[in-house]
Image (cartoon, grey):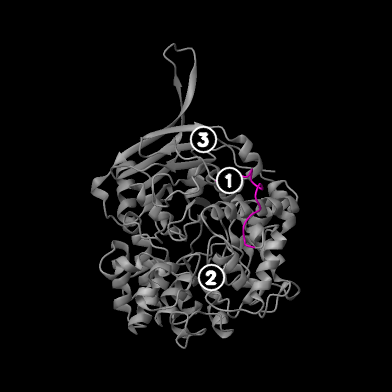
Amino acid sequence: MKHVQGPLCTVDVGERTSETEDIDDVLESFLGGRALGTKLAHDRVPFDADPLGADNRLYFATGPLQHSTMSFTGRMSATGVSPLTDGLLSSNAGGFLSRNFTGTGYSAVEITGASDDLVIVHVRDEVDESHSSGSETESRPRVEFEEVPDLEGATVPETCEYIEDEHGLENDHTVVAGPAGENQVRFASMMTSKDRAFGRGGLGAVLGSKNVKAITFDGDSTNEVEIPPVQMEIHGEAAQAEHPMKESGTTSVTEYANMVEALPTRYFSELSFDGIDGVNGDRVAEKKYKKGTCSACAFACKLPTRDEETGLETEGPEYETLMAFGPNSGVDDIVDVMKSNKLCDELGLDTISAGDAVAAYLSSEDEFGNVDLIHDLVEKIAYREGVGDTLAEGIDEFHDELGVENWTVKGMEFPAHDGRTLNGQGLAFATSNRGADHMYAEFYPYEYPLVDADDAFDKDGLENKPPKVIELENVNVIKDSGVLCKFSRDFVTPERMEQLLDADYEELLELGGEVVSLERHFNNQRGFDRGDDALPYEIPDFDQGLTEYYAERGWNDDGTVPDGQFGGDTAAPADD
């Protein structure tokens, strides 16, 4: 099996130390990206770690496909304990960071501890250092800690500008915590390439809790991983394909979702939006002023948008952002949604959770469509000012105080593709170790459907769906570990995945299942069980479907991984 190459670089920001460690035995079994980060976190983060404490660790990792020149490979993964869900969580981001990360020569970078002062951590490739005798050399990581008190409260663009001015590194070398991360908003994102996000689950708050304003990656030590020629076939097809996502990105599904009543509206009280014409994919396409892409990708589905009247420019909004700040907030003007998106990117907020939290407040105050209030609330959340301090804790924490329903799974706010209509996606929201995340299993394309009729499922009920949810969860682990964009699904078939990663498809699915079980086992030690695999609405035969899912996974009926599956451990080792 192809896998990422290089040592693990551990950076303790509290002690201001760094060291490297050979982890070849782990790499050979865990590919890279999410699988690698999950294995390292499971074995090295204490099961009782405070997500916002020094014992939590952040793992950054690419995969073997970042050593290709193939489309759909401009992504990388980050893993840690989520301050939003309180469970182990991986998030990945596109943009242009991944190739600069591979330049460091490390397979993964681990951030631990907590700094007393606000710092930027600069991670470079190893250097050879002679011993005093001059007869031997050893390698050591080049990691520098730069105190940056003047950047306290700085936005993501301001931080990127500082790094470029002072260090000559453009924003594709950076991971940044905006004001929301510094203020430990529980759904703060980590931003890279200025407007691409490690979005879901609050890993930006983890970075902020360590008093790290930014991390930069640079070097000339990329390891060689030979990728088969099929990469060029995929790249060519991505360049030549006619696809609606090339015009309007993920928003191309907006009108269809609205038509089948799977579009959350006015804080989930409705399933379609009467103002859809003002915020659909056509409105986004009209604002797109150039092509946008990620590193090495010819598919170019990103959305640089501009409103000529106001001069507003942003990246997006993508469909989930459009849902949260559009229909779910009662907003029918795409420019208003663009402004919400831009604010979230500048401040470092997950647009889905932030938009849903704002929609919850609008519901409690009967203020749907009040765009001035919406934009004010986004800023108040990031800086924890006034009611923003309450909203920054997430819906699971504040819903009782506001008198609204708790629209979360495991503490994570819902995206679109509503499970009340798409029942298989509903089950997938419930089983996801990450919480209400549509990309964990990505079942919704099979129910709209956006796939061939032979592969599609009826939207209603859960018949025959649990095994498919498991398959999709497992294959998405491999994509998140490769690392491969989820939008490669029309181009990277199981046969091509076997060629790219030099492994049987069934072997890859088994690895995916092991990683899902590792996540579940970690979360079980933190108290998660069947009661957490719950939805705020009913779907037919849900309990039966959940039981079938557990049985297919080989888990206990209470949603826990059997004792002994991972050595029978009950606690990971605490920091020395």
Residue highlighted by disc 3 = 221
Residue highlighted by disc 2 = 250
Secondary structure of residue under mark 2: helix
Q: Which mark is residue 39?
A: 1
Residue 451 x, y percent position in the rendering: 68, 72
Quarter the N terminus occupies: top right
**Relative depth, front residue between 414 and 346:** 414
Residue 517 in sight in this render: yes
Left or right: 413 with respect to 3? left
Question: Is 563 part of what is drawn in magenta?
Answer: yes
Residue 69 in sight in this render: no
**Relative depth, front residue between 201 and 397:** 397
10 Å crowding of disc 1: few (<14), some (14-19), many (20+): many
Q: Amino acid at mark 2?
A: Thr
Tell me the residue at 48%/19% (across/down).
137
Foreground disc of the pair 1, 3: 1
Counting residues from the start of the chain, the first of labels 2 and 1 encountered is 1
Counting residues from the start of the chain, the first of labels 3 and 2 encountered is 3
Quarter the C terminus occupies: top left
Q: Which mark is residue 408?
A: none
Foreground disc of the pair 2, 1: 1
Magenta-colored span: 558-570
